Image (cartoon, coloured by chain):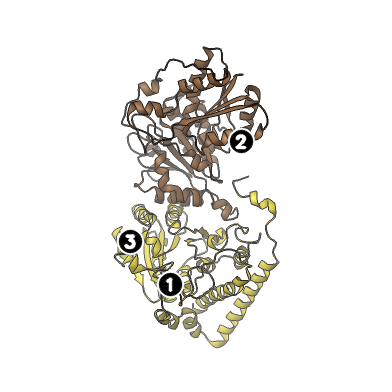
């Protein structure tokens, strides 16, 4: 179990470190929102899912895309704007999609995918498909009207959806206490009759256990939805490849406890040394291959500008 | 033999036939399953197809539109019904940022087979926020089809085509057009979503009328015939994409174009049609004109409301003036039956 978790955590961390490293070269000519520090949530959740299950994400979705099994080559090619990207270079980092892996896309507009996840889950139930939907969003999205509209309707229709609030306590640069009168986001879900649990400490194993229980309930035909608020922390700036503890809105002292409980290191340390080294070597090679693939891939042909507007 | 249905009955029949044919079609919206059934257009569908496929929604347009987009991504074919087009302003993020763009921004990997029906709510003092024709907002955005047929025949055929279309379609109706009657074949059929329809052939002036304004243009044509003017009347049926070929061929013949929209003219569909016509006939002697709502907020009181909306007399006068070198003439004003007989509250 730990090996799988570590492979996924390490892979996401290393991919994003490489993205950050490449970014100043301008090979990636669009915004990137890195998940470094938050990988545990995506991994803990997605390890509880099957490939046929579906996730909807946010503009900070590198982690969930990869954790759910999204194609790494296609992701890096997408960031590079190449025709081999998961959206042919038309979507970029904020709109990663891999329908075969159940990654159903992400929006640049906060809170936008929440109702889509509910609708998708409703459709799966109506179609009697044995699959569930997970929706990732942040603490900022919980103030959007669509959050409340969607939670109410999901509860009303008992849709098989699991809401995952990745609470990093920051909406761009504003702190949760400056945006919300009551910090108990689970209470909002509970108000709609949705079982809601808060998971502290960014612990991938614990997140997995609790989400897995909800997944099993849905698989056995129990009504949804379920809600989890996963406390986590963003190490990097809101958008871009750098750290920004000198920007004034947060201090590195606040971050220390998150650095010290880094899940990538913690779970890695639970493995035998040679096992860990093998995983790291394999992942590093896969990442090199993906960046090489992206580099070598062509940009979309000019006529691609006009394709995919409607079915032809 | 003619089989006469109202526009509203044609919409109900189209929906019922498609729901029977394809179990992935669902209908949602405020009041779709109540005793009025969206003025009859969704009446009793919930009894026939069950509450899983036909259901009421909370007053939550943004969330419900996103819900419908999600269901469409999963392979359902939702028809999301709004009794007022004004309410779509609450759903613009989902419609414009997701529904219109999903196929493109995800590189062709997904589709959103969604139909959004909405009704322009003129008459009975509907006022500022229950009367707007906002179709140009959607026609402006690549990735959305916008259709607004004027006849019961095209209402049925275009709604079936919209439901079967694998991309989002904004299906625009007009409250007063629901009462129009006409021939509607019983068996399911489609009409293309990119073809205008010539409603009446003429030689002297081309009248293009959007939705209910096509009906008003036909009435204007009757007035004009009394003074020897033979107007051609075209219903664009689809506002995005626009079938300019049909319109340009007509203007080539008449040399005169009046576009009448059930909306404001500024930056609107009428402006678009006139602009494309002007671009096509540059340097040639063509006369063009737009007619639409007066450029103000819709007033509630009847006398101001009468001034606010285009009507057959205004259209006929404009056409006369164009044909007779700025000559002045106006037919006698009479309110059409759907306005005289209209009983509220809607």
The chain letter corresponding to brown is: B
State whether residue A11 is above or below residue A125.
below
User: Closer to the camera, B186 or A20?
Assistant: A20
Distance from Cα at disc 2 to Cα at disc 3: 52 Å
Q: Which residue is drawn at 58% across and 52% down?
A: B104
Both marks 2 and 1 on one chain? no
Q: Position of residue A268 (x, y in %)?
A: 51, 82
Which callout, 3 or 1, points at the residue further toward the start of the chain? 3
- Residue for badge 1: A208
Chain bearing tag 3 is: A
What SS does tag 1 mark?
Answer: helix
Structural crowding at the residue carrying mark 1, measured as other residues with C-alpha within 10 Å and reported as few (<14), some (14–19) or many (≥20): many
- Residue for badge 3: A189
Q: Chain A is drawn in which colour?
A: yellow
Callouts 2 and 3 close, C-beta under 8 Å: no
Q: Which residue is drawn at 56% across and 60% down?
A: A98
* Screen quadrant of the C terminus of chain A: top right
Q: Which label is found at residue B276?
A: 2
Q: Where is residue B259 in the image (x, y as percent from the top left)?
A: 54, 29
Structural crowding at the residue carrying mark 2, measured as other residues with C-alpha within 10 Å and reported as few (<14), some (14–19) or many (≥20): few
Q: Where is residue A63 in the image (x, y as percent from the top left)?
A: 51, 69
To which quarter of the image does residue B88 belong? top left
Q: Residue at x 37, y 75 (%)?
A: A200
Residue sticking out furthest to the bottom: A273
Structural crowding at the residue carrying mark 3, measured as other residues with C-alpha within 10 Å and reported as few (<14), some (14–19) or many (≥20): many
State whether residue B260 is above or below residue B91.
above
To which quarter of the image does residue B174 belong? top left
Distance from Cα at disc 2 to Cα at disc 1: 58 Å
Q: Position of residue B321 (x, y in %)?
A: 54, 20
Chain bearing tag 1 is: A
State whether residue B99 is above or below residue B287.
below
Tell us which disc is closer to us: 2 or 3. 2
């Amino acid at each position: 179990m730990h090996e799988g978790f570590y492979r996924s955590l390490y892979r996401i961390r290393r991919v994003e470190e490489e993205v950050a490293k490449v970014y100043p070269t301008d090979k990636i000519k669009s915004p990137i929102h890195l998940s470094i520090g938050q990988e545990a949530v995506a991994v803990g959740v997605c390890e509880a899912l099957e490939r046929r299950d579906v996730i909807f994400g946010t503009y900070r979705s590198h982690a969930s895309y990869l954790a759910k099994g999204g194609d790494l080559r296609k992701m890096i090619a997408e960031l590079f704007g190449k025709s081999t990207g998961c959206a042919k270079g038309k979507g970029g980092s904020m709109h990663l999609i891999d329908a075969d892996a159940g990654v159903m896309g992400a929006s640049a507009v906060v809170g936008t995918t929440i109702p889509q996840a509910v609708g998708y889950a409703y459709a799966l139930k109506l179609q009697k498909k044995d699959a569930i939907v997970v929706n990732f969003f942040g603490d900022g999205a919980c103030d959007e009207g669509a959050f409340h509209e969607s939670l109410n309707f999901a509860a009303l229709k008992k849709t098989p959806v699991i809401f995952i609030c990745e609470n990093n306590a920051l909406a761009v640069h504003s702190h949760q206490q400056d945006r919300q009168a009551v910090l108990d986001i689970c209470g909002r879900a509970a108000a709609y009759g949705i079982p809601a649990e808060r998971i502290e400490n960014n612990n991938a194993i614990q997140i997995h256990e609790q989400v897995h229980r909800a997944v099993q309930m849905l698989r056995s035909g129990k009504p949804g939805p379920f809600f989890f608020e996963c406390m986590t922390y963003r190490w990097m700036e809101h958008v871009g490849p750098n750290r920004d503890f000198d920007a004034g809105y947060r201090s590195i002292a606040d971050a220390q406890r998150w650095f010290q409980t880094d899940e990538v290191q913690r779970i890695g340390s639970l493995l035998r040394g040679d096992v860990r080294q093998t995983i790291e070597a394999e992942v590093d090679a896969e990442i090199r291959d993906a960046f090489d693939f992206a580099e070598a891939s062509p940009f979309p042909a000019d006529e691609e500008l006009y394709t995919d507007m409607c079915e032809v | 033999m003619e089989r006469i249905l109202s526009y509203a009955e044609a919409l109900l029949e189209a929906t019922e036939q498609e729901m029977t044919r394809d179990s992935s079609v669902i209908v949602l919206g405020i009041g779709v399953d109540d005793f009025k059934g969206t003025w009859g257009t969704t009446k009793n569908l919930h009894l026939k197809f069950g509450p899983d496929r036909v259901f009421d929604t909370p007053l939550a347009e943004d969330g419900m539109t996103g819900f419908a987009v999600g269901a469409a991504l999963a392979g359902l074919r939702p028809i999301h019904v709004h009794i007022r087009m004004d309410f779509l302003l609450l759903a613009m993020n989902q419609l414009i940022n997701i529904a219109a763009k999903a196929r493109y921004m995800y590189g062709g990997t997904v589709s959103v087979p969604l139909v959004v029906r909405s009704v322009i709510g003129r008459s009975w003092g509907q006022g500022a926020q229950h009367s707007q024709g906002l179709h140009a907002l959607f026609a402006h955005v690549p990735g959305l089809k916008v259709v607004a047929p004027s006849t019961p025949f095209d209402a049925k055929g275009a709604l079936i085509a919209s439901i079967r279309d694998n991309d989002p379609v904004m299906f625009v109706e007009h409250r007063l057009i629901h009462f129009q009657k006409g021939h509607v074949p019983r068996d399911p059929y489609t009409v293309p979503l990119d073809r205008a329809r010539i409603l009446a052939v003429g030689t002297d002036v081309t009248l293009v009328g959007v939705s209910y304004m096509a009906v008003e243009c036909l009435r204007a044509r009757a007035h004009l015939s009394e003074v020897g003017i033979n107007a051609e009347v075209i219903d664009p049926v689809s506002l995005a994409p626009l079938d300019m070929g049909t319109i340009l061929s007509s203007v080539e013949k008449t040399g005169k174009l009046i576009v009448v929209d059930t909306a404001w003219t500024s930056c609107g569909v009428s402006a678009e049609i006139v602009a494309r016509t002007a671009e096509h006939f540059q340097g040639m002697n063509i006369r063009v004109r737009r007619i639409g709502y007066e450029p103000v907020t819709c007033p509630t009181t009847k006398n101001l409301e009468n001034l606010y909306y285009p009507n057959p007399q205004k259209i006929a006068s404009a056409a006369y003036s164009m044909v007779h070198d700025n000559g002045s003439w106006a037919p006698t004003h009479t309110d059409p039956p759907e306005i005289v007989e209209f009983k509220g509250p809607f």
